[in-house]
Amino acid sequence: MNFFRCASIRAQNNEKFADRANKRRRKANAAERTIDDRWAGNRRKIELVYPCIGPSYETGLPPKHLNHQSVDKSFLTETPESQLLAAIPAGRRTEVAPDRPMKIGILGTRGIPNTYGGFEQFAQYLSVGLVRRGHSVWVYNSSNHPYLETHFHGVRIIHCSDWENRIGTAGQFVYDYNCLMDARKREFDVLLQLGYTSNSIFHSIWPGKALNVVNMDGLEWKRTKYSPLVQKFLLRAEKWAARHGHVLVADSLGIRDYIEKKYRRPATYIPYGADIPDSYDLAKLSRWGLRPGGYFLLVARMEPENNIELIIKAWLGAGKRKPLVLVGDAGNGFGSYLRKIYRDEKLLFAGAIYETGTINALRHYSSLYLHGHSVGGTNPSLLEAMACGCTIAAHDNPFNREILGNEACYFSSKEDLTSLIGKLPHGDQTKDWKRLNEEKIITRYSWDNVIDRYLRLFMENVPV
């Protein structure tokens, strides 16, 4: 806790000096525009070609220790390239400055390929998609990441020292500091920062010549796993990111509206992505002795705000009609607590699963997909459940309703969910839900759409 207090005090004392330095740097570099200029209407008109939406456009803190021991890493080497990249669309080169591809850096994740969570999955899809559209992309990987190569399907990997496995959460600040210091030497056109929890405190050393794009993530300071002091720091970190980012991105309309109202800064809405799988391998279920429609499924990090314990209690209260399969690394403190308290032969802790064919089969053949996430914007696992044709019961909050609309059932308490599990929706109704949710994936959340929208955003805002 002392680390957060010292970091916050130091940043506040130096903030005015950082502002002066930023002003001098902007005056010295004619190529760099101020935030106000960018949003005063002095933008370039750019003609872009997008295959998925039309011919043209005119522009107008996590768990302390990362536990790789319980993660199946075979997919890092055994997954065929065609399977790994099948869902990452190639797209088409834009018609803007085709002779000058952009140099793009991505930081703020533990690295690619994904062995952790949503931002890592996003960085994997976006980086490969941008490379396949003709741009040069660098992704920062933690030194604790199991993938040790320097390239990943055309994406350059930069390995930076990460002390999280030695000193806990404070190591994330060391890691982000190292990434930013390296980025200052790379002369990126765009630096995409995914999240802000441990990098916005270093805003004074963000690369001055790059377009600093910040994905504002969810409302991190609301997560119940954090102490009041840490929550206060995270709210301050959110403010630094909103104030100093050149361009802000929100992955849900609710987060966008929150940012624009609270910080009076425009934010661009670009959701997370998903694609509908071509097929599902029923044989993948044999590993756990499961049968189609014979189990309930939950996919989440083992964190209190994902309402996992509430879901387990509701399942127990409904009489354990079918096995409950929990997918997620249970090696952290909360996961260990759940494993210790809730011991039942029908409660299966499957661990973290990143092999696409396996996780998609588990989703598709589940009887009911239970989504307890209560904090954040567009949740990746929810979109992927929709893409796999799941019948979904979701925690009742604005973020989930924004995505699912009327095509799901909702719960707010253990009693709600117990009743729901005891009497599942009618088959005809769930068939319509699945069809409409799949249509949303195609029209709103496809990876092709998401990658093109990020590319469009970069090209609209990179200084000439």
Image (tube, rainbow, N blue to C red):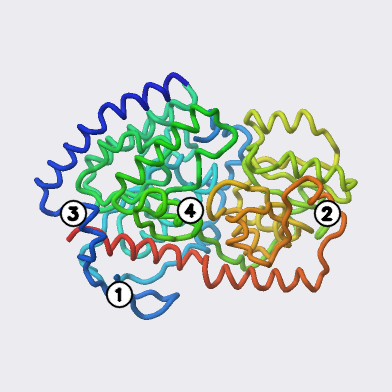
Q: Mark 4 sits on what residue? A: 255
Q: Please tell me which of labels 1 and 2 falls first in the chain.
A: 1
Q: Please tell me which of labels 2 and 4 falls first in the chain.
A: 4
Q: Are marks 2 and 4 in contact (CB under 8 Å)?
A: no
Question: Mark 2 or mark 4, which is nearer to you?
Answer: 4
Kind of residue indicated by mark 2: Ile
Q: Are marks 3 and 1 in contact (CB under 8 Å)?
A: no
**Whether residue 150 can be seen here:** no
Q: Specify whether 93 is left or right of 405.
A: left
Secondary structure, mark 3, is loop
Q: Mark 3 sits on what residue? A: 33
Q: Residue at x 43, y 27 (%)?
A: 171
Q: Please tell me which of labels 3 and 2 falls first in the chain.
A: 3
Q: Residue at x 25, y 28 (%)?
A: 14
Q: Quadrant of the C terminus?
A: bottom left
Give percent across and percent down for residue 298.
71, 49
Give the crowd class for mark 1: few <14, some 14-19, many >=20 residues within 10 Å. few
